[in-house]
Amino acid sequence: MMSNATLSIGGTNVEMPVLSGSIGPDVVDIRKLYAQTGAFTFDPGFMSTASCESSITYIDGDEGVLLHRGYPIGQLAEQSSFLEVCYLLLNGDLPRQDEYANFTRTITRHTMVHEQLSTFYRGFRRDAHPMAVMCGVVGALSAFYHDSTDIADPEQRRIASHRLIAKMPTIAAMAYKYSVGQPFIYPDNRLSYSGNFLKMTFGVPAEEYEVNPAIERAMDRIFILHADHEQNASTSTVRLAGSSGANPFACIAAGIACLWGPAHGGANEAALNMLREIGRPERIPEYLARAKDKNDPFRLMGFGHRVYKNYDPRATVMQQTLREVFEALKINDPVFEVALQLEEMALNDPYFIEKKLFPNVDFYSGVILSAVGFPTEMFTVLFALARTVGWVAQWNEMISDPAQKIGRPRQLYTGPTQRDYVPLNQR
Ligand code: CMC
């Protein structure tokens, strides 16, 4: 049932509709507030603002629930595959067998990149951060694939979406290969999405590359866990960039740029660095004390989340995946013990309990990726690879909405009021 909220402002009462979604908190529809009152709302960081309507992903941060098109992330991570989750995010339902086969074939067919794109990499220094390379190369895709940049054409949007999902592993692996001075490896379409990525990253032309099934499965699961996450900073960036009508390749490059920040996708790199710095369990209390000290900017990386005020359900799967990878590779790294003990001590510490700070997806992912052989600089690249489908699905949802408008927030202006220009020689 639709209800109204009443706001009293400057002696006038304004009625605003309260809208309900299928689940989750109601929203107060303030779209007419400015027209009716001349006032804006003020919500930096979007703490109380729903920026759009969406039917893709649902998060209940208090309960630690994450659903993609209604399916719990734990079930998808356990039973599905990354490409199936891609189909689900893009199309709204799980595919039938023929639909899944067609989708897999289509994505597989698009895995190669234009040969000239490889020369693009050589413009970067060898020691460039691979995320810098990703921002540049993905942005450059619009110069190579003109035939899928007309956003008004649903077929072109579909092709661009498939191209982005299919080419991202190739582009990411090439960024890695360039940084280590090894030749680029072409995609091998006999392999799975994740197996192919592992081969393009760790294979060399001089040797046969055998995909380790346990690592392939772990990689696929990590991709699933990062596939989408509602209106996070990078997704909102993609939507905002796309709202002006920018082409999808440019929008995804904008998302990659946003993801790079340490408070977002860069956190797994920061979390692993922190765990390595801690080094041994005896030093954990020292770091916990620093995280709690208001005068110390240090934060426990991989802990806390804007939305989750409970255990991040992705962290649960990550911890399990970490065990599997360590077992498959017979790794005995003290960093795992540090991570487990740090988690336990933080979860029992009044500061973290009171502020509802729990491990997030990034707490364990860095340890896994490092065990698989990725250097830390590649972690955010892998996040970008997996999140591409989420960005693309959200971008498509926005563009196909007939009510879509350019995103244009307003502000609370606190600068100087109007004043007259004084010529330079009189100042
Ligand atoms: N360690 C210590 N204290 C923390 C931490 C932390 N990791 N996270 C939050 N707090 C404290 C913070 O100091 C603040 O205390 P007070 O109320 O006394 O000022 C309170 O908890 C609330 O923090 P906030 O910064 O206002 O919360 P936010 O919602 O703006 O920030 C966050 C969320 C993820 C940026 C933050 O928790 C953080 O910096 N965590 C570490 C970085 C990290 O792991 N990021 C990955 C996020 S998950 C992956 C993704 O979605 O990209």
Image: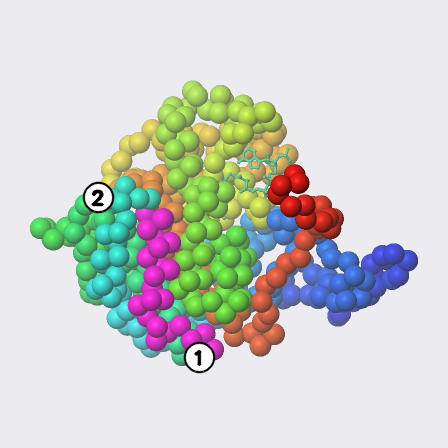
In the picture, residue 386 is in which quadrant?
A: bottom left
- Say which label, 2 or 1, has the lower sequence index: 1
Does the magenta segment cover residue 150? yes
- Residue type at the position of mark 2: Val
User: How far from the left and from the top, in percent, is residue 314?
Assistant: 46, 49
What is the C-alpha distance between the residues marked 2 and 1?
40 Å
Q: Name the spot of residue 418 as percent of width and height, x first.
A: 73, 50
Note whether residue 212 is visible.
no
Viewer-proximal residue among 414 and 285: 414
Figure quadrant of the N terminus: bottom right
Which disc is residue 284 wearing?
none
Q: Name the amino acid, label 1.
A: Asp
Residue 58 or residue 425, whichever sits in front: 425
Mark 2 close to ligand 1, CB under 8 Å: no
Q: What residue appears at the point 26 percent right and 51 percent down from the top-left corner?
A: 123
Q: Which mark is residue 180?
A: 2
Vertical relation: 316 (above or below) 350 = below
Residue situated furthest left in the rendering = 206
Would residue 408 be counted in the magenta stretch? no
Residue lying at 22% horizontally and 49% vertically, measured from the top left: 177
> Which residue corresponds to mark 1?
153
Q: Quadrant of the C terminus?
A: top right
Q: Position of residue 73 (x, y in %)?
A: 47, 56
| Front-lying residue, 202 or 332 | 202
Q: Which residues are magenta?
A: 130-154
Residue at 21% from the left image edge and 44% from the top image edge: 180
Secondary structure, mark 2, is helix
**Dominant secondary structure, magenta:** helix
For ligand 1, the image quadrant comes to top right
Instruction: Bin the neighbour count of mark 2 within 10 Å (Cα to Cα): few under 14, some 14-19, many 20 and up.
Output: few
